[in-house]
Amino acid sequence: MTQQTVSLIGAPTDIGAGHRGASMGPEALRVAGLGERLSARGLKVIDRGNLQGPLNPWLPPENGYRHLDEVAAWNMAVHTAVRQELQAGRIPVMLGGDHCLAIGSISAVADHCRDTGKKLRVLWLDAHADFNTANATPSGNIHGMPVACLCGNGPDVLTGIGSHRPSTSPQVFRQVGIRSVDEGEKKLVREAGMKIVDMRHIDEVGMKRAMEEVLADIDEDTHLHVSFDVDFLDPPDAPGVGTTVRGGPTYREAQLCMEMIADTGRLASLDIVELNPAYDVHNQTAELAVDLVESLFGKSTLIR
Ligand SMILES: NC(=[NH2+])NCCC[C@H](N)C(=O)O
Ligand SMILES: [Mn+2]
Ligand SMILES: [Mn+2]
């Protein structure tokens, strides 16, 4: 097999979040050895450095959105960078930054899939559904809205990023690890028919069967994008995030999830978002994220 190339793209901003500090995420992932570990897995790694965008003015929401113009500017930068790496045949790994940046990365992946005739599948690993709208949001923070925006439900400056509006549809998503959905947001995910593997389902059937369900209809034509919100993980293991929710996957469950994704051989792009070093303890959450991303790229403890 030809050697695959991974491009690391830093997007150092907390523009869509309710806590400051995710802007330090890209550097914490580098310090935790992300590039070196992927190289050691046999991948060619190019670090594109960090994108630039507006500073965080830290203002209250206006008309239901906080920092809307700045969020749009950052996402346009992410879109362009991710698109470029895909066109060059590389695997873009977007280092957030908060989860609003998935609007830019996934719209780029969706455009690329339209160009190449691939079938897009997004695995959204998260404690949250991130399907809020200006009406449903309890906070105005746009990191709680990217999935809705990508499905065309959001402000024009965000739903219009990329060459197609909407960029994608709820059918494209499989959400895993979900355990915090706001009241109005629940109604929206139900109406949209969003396929959600929530923690209750993982408790009931186990991570193995839950992931078998999630990965069932992936085939050789699938472009698999993983949007990994680090708050997916159980907070005692991963304190370095702004919005912790108790009762996430254990270390072993998260490993199995990543290993089963790797086994499909279809991973073609990745976001690592919401890592917040201001809340971390000795960079342990960044190190855990790197460990799991290695598994996503095929590291395994299997002996047989
Ligand atoms: N990407 C995240 N961490 N999202 C958290 C969203 C929290 C909450 N549902 C909100 O909309 O404000
Ligand atoms: Mn999220
Ligand atoms: Mn989250």
Image (cartoon, grey):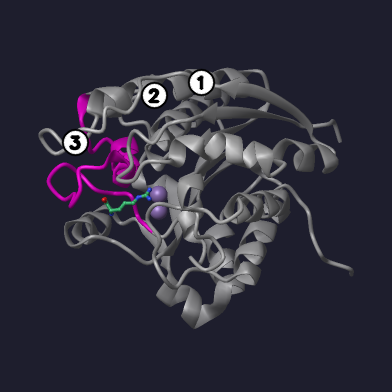
Decide: is 57 above or below 196: above
Instruction: Report the amino acid beneath label 3.
Output: Tyr
Amino acid at dot 1: Leu
For label 2, the residue is 74
How far across and how far down the image is residue 153, in percent?
23, 38
- Asked whether mark 2 and ligand 1 are closer than 8 Å, the reply comes as no
- Taking the magenta stretch, the answer to whether it contains residue 134 is yes
Name which of mark 3 and mark 1 comes first in the sequence. 1
Kind of residue at disc 2 = Trp
User: Which part of the image, by quadrant, shows the N terminus?
Assistant: top right
The residue under the point 70% across, 54% down is 291
Q: Which residues are magenta?
A: 128-156
- Most foreground residue, 293 or 52: 52
Q: Secondary structure at mark 1?
A: loop
Lower position in the chain sequence, tag 1 or tag 2: 1
- SS label for mark 3: loop
- Residue plotted at (60% across, 64% down): 254
Q: CA distance from mark 3 to mark 2?
A: 15 Å
